[in-house]
Amino acid sequence: MKFGQKNSAANNPDETSGDQDVQDLVEESLELKIEALEKALADSRDQLLRRTADLDNMRRRHQQEREQLIYDANKRLILDLLSVVDDLERTLEHAAEQHDPMAQGIELVYKNFLKTLERYGAKPMNVVGETFDPMKHDALMEEPRTDVEAGMITREIQKGYTLGDSILRHAKVFVARSSD
Protein backbone atom coordinates (compact mmCIF):
# COMPACT_ATOMS: atom_id res chain seq x y z
CA MET A 1 0.00 0.00 0.00
CA LYS A 2 1.36 3.44 -0.90
CA PHE A 3 1.69 6.27 1.51
CA GLY A 4 -1.45 8.27 1.67
CA GLN A 5 -3.63 5.49 0.34
CA LYS A 6 -6.28 4.32 2.66
CA ASN A 7 -7.23 0.74 3.26
CA SER A 8 -10.69 0.43 1.89
CA ALA A 9 -11.39 -2.65 4.04
CA ALA A 10 -10.39 -0.78 7.18
CA ASN A 11 -12.75 2.00 6.28
CA ASN A 12 -15.61 -0.37 5.45
CA PRO A 13 -16.68 -2.46 8.44
CA ASP A 14 -19.08 -4.54 6.31
CA GLU A 15 -16.21 -5.89 4.22
CA THR A 16 -14.23 -6.84 7.33
CA SER A 17 -17.12 -8.78 8.84
CA GLY A 18 -17.77 -10.44 5.48
CA ASP A 19 -14.16 -11.61 5.27
CA GLN A 20 -14.43 -12.88 8.84
CA ASP A 21 -17.65 -14.77 8.00
CA VAL A 22 -15.98 -16.39 5.00
CA GLN A 23 -12.97 -17.29 7.11
CA ASP A 24 -15.26 -18.77 9.81
CA LEU A 25 -17.11 -20.82 7.18
CA VAL A 26 -13.83 -22.09 5.75
CA GLU A 27 -12.59 -23.06 9.23
CA GLU A 28 -15.90 -24.76 10.04
CA SER A 29 -15.78 -26.63 6.75
CA LEU A 30 -12.20 -27.72 7.44
CA GLU A 31 -13.15 -28.88 10.94
CA LEU A 32 -16.02 -30.93 9.50
CA LYS A 33 -13.69 -32.46 6.94
CA ILE A 34 -11.13 -33.27 9.66
CA GLU A 35 -13.85 -34.90 11.79
CA ALA A 36 -15.05 -36.90 8.79
CA LEU A 37 -11.50 -38.00 7.98
CA GLU A 38 -10.82 -38.94 11.63
CA LYS A 39 -14.06 -40.98 11.67
CA ALA A 40 -13.11 -42.68 8.39
CA LEU A 41 -9.65 -43.42 9.81
CA ALA A 42 -11.17 -44.89 12.98
CA ASP A 43 -13.56 -46.99 10.87
CA SER A 44 -10.65 -48.20 8.72
CA ARG A 45 -8.64 -49.12 11.81
CA ASP A 46 -11.61 -50.97 13.25
CA GLN A 47 -12.17 -52.81 9.98
CA LEU A 48 -8.46 -53.68 9.78
CA LEU A 49 -8.49 -55.05 13.35
CA ARG A 50 -11.59 -57.13 12.60
CA ARG A 51 -10.10 -58.55 9.42
CA THR A 52 -6.85 -59.32 11.20
CA ALA A 53 -8.79 -61.13 13.94
CA ASP A 54 -10.81 -63.01 11.29
CA LEU A 55 -7.59 -64.04 9.57
CA ASP A 56 -6.08 -65.24 12.86
CA ASN A 57 -9.26 -67.20 13.63
CA MET A 58 -9.23 -68.74 10.17
CA ARG A 59 -5.58 -69.78 10.59
CA ARG A 60 -6.32 -71.29 13.98
CA ARG A 61 -9.35 -73.20 12.64
CA HIS A 62 -7.31 -74.41 9.67
CA GLN A 63 -4.55 -75.65 12.01
CA GLN A 64 -7.08 -77.42 14.24
CA GLU A 65 -8.77 -79.04 11.23
CA ARG A 66 -5.39 -80.16 9.92
CA GLU A 67 -4.42 -81.65 13.28
CA GLN A 68 -7.81 -83.39 13.49
CA LEU A 69 -7.39 -84.86 9.99
CA ILE A 70 -3.94 -86.20 10.91
CA TYR A 71 -5.29 -87.62 14.18
CA ASP A 72 -8.21 -89.31 12.39
CA ALA A 73 -5.93 -90.76 9.71
CA ASN A 74 -3.53 -92.11 12.36
CA LYS A 75 -6.46 -93.51 14.32
CA ARG A 76 -7.82 -95.40 11.30
CA LEU A 77 -4.38 -96.76 10.43
CA ILE A 78 -3.63 -97.86 13.99
CA LEU A 79 -7.06 -99.51 14.30
CA ASP A 80 -6.32 -101.51 11.15
CA LEU A 81 -2.89 -102.48 12.50
CA LEU A 82 -4.35 -103.70 15.80
CA SER A 83 -5.75 -106.76 14.01
CA VAL A 84 -2.15 -107.63 13.08
CA VAL A 85 -1.14 -107.22 16.74
CA ASP A 86 -4.00 -109.53 17.74
CA ASP A 87 -2.82 -112.12 15.20
CA LEU A 88 0.75 -111.90 16.56
CA GLU A 89 -0.54 -112.40 20.12
CA ARG A 90 -2.54 -115.48 19.10
CA THR A 91 0.47 -116.84 17.20
CA LEU A 92 2.69 -116.36 20.25
CA GLU A 93 0.18 -118.16 22.50
CA HIS A 94 0.00 -121.07 20.05
CA ALA A 95 3.79 -121.16 19.55
CA ALA A 96 4.35 -121.26 23.33
CA GLU A 97 2.04 -124.29 23.58
CA GLN A 98 3.89 -126.04 20.73
CA HIS A 99 7.38 -124.99 21.94
CA ASP A 100 8.03 -123.61 18.47
CA PRO A 101 11.57 -122.17 17.99
CA MET A 102 10.13 -119.44 15.73
CA ALA A 103 8.37 -117.98 18.78
CA GLN A 104 11.40 -115.85 19.71
CA GLY A 105 11.44 -114.19 16.29
CA ILE A 106 7.69 -113.64 16.37
CA GLU A 107 7.95 -112.20 19.88
CA LEU A 108 10.65 -109.79 18.73
CA VAL A 109 8.45 -108.62 15.84
CA TYR A 110 5.50 -108.29 18.25
CA LYS A 111 7.49 -106.16 20.74
CA ASN A 112 8.84 -103.91 17.98
CA PHE A 113 5.34 -103.52 16.61
CA LEU A 114 4.06 -102.44 20.05
CA LYS A 115 6.95 -99.96 20.46
CA THR A 116 6.12 -98.45 17.07
CA LEU A 117 2.46 -98.07 18.02
CA GLU A 118 3.46 -96.45 21.32
CA ARG A 119 5.62 -93.90 19.48
CA TYR A 120 2.43 -92.78 17.74
CA GLY A 121 0.48 -92.62 21.02
CA ALA A 122 -1.31 -95.99 20.99
CA LYS A 123 -0.93 -97.92 24.24
CA PRO A 124 -2.50 -101.16 25.45
CA MET A 125 -4.72 -101.02 28.52
CA ASN A 126 -4.10 -103.35 31.44
CA VAL A 127 -7.58 -104.17 32.68
CA VAL A 128 -7.54 -107.47 34.59
CA GLY A 129 -8.32 -106.72 38.23
CA GLU A 130 -9.91 -103.33 37.49
CA THR A 131 -13.52 -102.43 38.07
CA PHE A 132 -15.63 -102.74 34.94
CA ASP A 133 -16.14 -99.39 33.19
CA PRO A 134 -18.46 -99.40 30.16
CA MET A 135 -16.60 -96.37 28.79
CA LYS A 136 -13.41 -98.45 28.46
CA HIS A 137 -14.53 -102.08 28.42
CA ASP A 138 -16.96 -104.31 26.54
CA ALA A 139 -18.30 -107.07 28.78
CA LEU A 140 -18.62 -110.31 26.81
CA MET A 141 -19.79 -112.39 29.72
CA GLU A 142 -20.39 -112.35 33.44
CA GLU A 143 -19.03 -115.29 35.34
CA PRO A 144 -19.94 -116.24 38.91
CA ARG A 145 -16.90 -115.78 41.16
CA THR A 146 -16.43 -115.89 44.92
CA ASP A 147 -12.72 -114.98 44.97
CA VAL A 148 -13.17 -111.41 43.62
CA GLU A 149 -15.70 -108.63 44.06
CA ALA A 150 -18.65 -108.40 41.70
CA GLY A 151 -17.97 -105.99 38.85
CA MET A 152 -14.25 -106.75 38.70
CA ILE A 153 -12.66 -107.78 35.40
CA THR A 154 -11.47 -111.38 35.61
CA ARG A 155 -10.23 -112.07 32.08
CA GLU A 156 -9.26 -110.10 29.03
CA ILE A 157 -10.30 -111.66 25.74
CA GLN A 158 -9.08 -108.84 23.49
CA LYS A 159 -6.76 -106.00 24.55
CA GLY A 160 -8.08 -102.48 24.61
CA TYR A 161 -5.97 -99.55 23.43
CA THR A 162 -5.84 -95.83 24.07
CA LEU A 163 -4.67 -93.16 21.66
CA GLY A 164 -3.55 -90.17 23.67
CA ASP A 165 -6.32 -89.52 26.18
CA SER A 166 -9.10 -91.23 24.22
CA ILE A 167 -10.15 -94.84 23.91
CA LEU A 168 -9.05 -96.28 20.58
CA ARG A 169 -10.52 -99.74 21.11
CA HIS A 170 -12.50 -101.06 24.06
CA ALA A 171 -11.12 -104.10 25.88
CA LYS A 172 -13.30 -107.19 25.55
CA VAL A 173 -13.53 -108.72 29.01
CA PHE A 174 -15.22 -111.17 31.37
CA VAL A 175 -16.66 -109.61 34.51
CA ALA A 176 -17.18 -111.24 37.89
CA ARG A 177 -20.63 -111.42 39.43
CA SER A 178 -21.65 -112.70 42.79
CA SER A 179 -22.59 -116.37 42.83
CA ASP A 180 -26.00 -115.77 44.47
Image (cartoon, grey):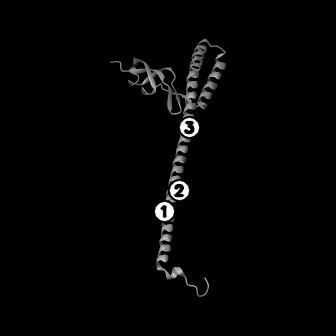
Residue flagged by tag 2: what amino acid is it?
Leu
- Packing grade of label 2 (10 A; few <14, some 14-19, many >=20) is few
Residue flagged by tag 3: what amino acid is it?
His
**Residue 89 higher or lower than 168, as above or below:** above
Closer to the camera in the image, 109 or 68: 68
Quadrant for the C terminus in the image: top left
**Residue 6 higher or lower than 150, as above or below:** below
**Residue 19 higher or lower than 32, as above or below:** below
Front position among marks 1 and 3: 1
Front position among marks 2 and 1: 1
Quadrant for the N terminus in the image: bottom right
Give coordinates of residue 69: x percent, y percent. 56, 31
Give the residue displayed 62% in from the left and 22% down from the top: 110
Give coordinates of residue 178: x percent, y percent. 36, 20
Give the residue displayed 59% in from the left and 15% down from the top: 91
Tell me how far mark 1 sits from mark 3, CA to CA: 44 Å
Give coordinates of residue 66: x percent, y percent. 57, 34
- Residue 98 vs residue 149: left or right? right
Closer to the camera in the image, 26 or 102: 26
Work out which residue is located at the far left of the displayed protein and give it.
180
Query: What numbered label is drawn on residue 9?
Result: none
Give coordinates of residue 123: x percent, y percent. 55, 29
Closer to the camera in the image, 171 or 73: 73
Q: Earlier in the sequence, mark 1 or mark 3?
A: 1
Query: What numbered label is drawn on residue 62?
Result: 3
- Packing grade of label 3 (10 A; few <14, some 14-19, many >=20) is few
Q: Earlier in the sequence, mark 2 or mark 1?
A: 1
Query: What numbered label is drawn on residue 32?
Result: 1
- Secondary structure beneath dot 2 equals helix
Closer to the camera in the image, 25 or 147: 25
The residue that disc 2 covers is: 41
**Residue 70 higher or lower than 5, as above or below:** above
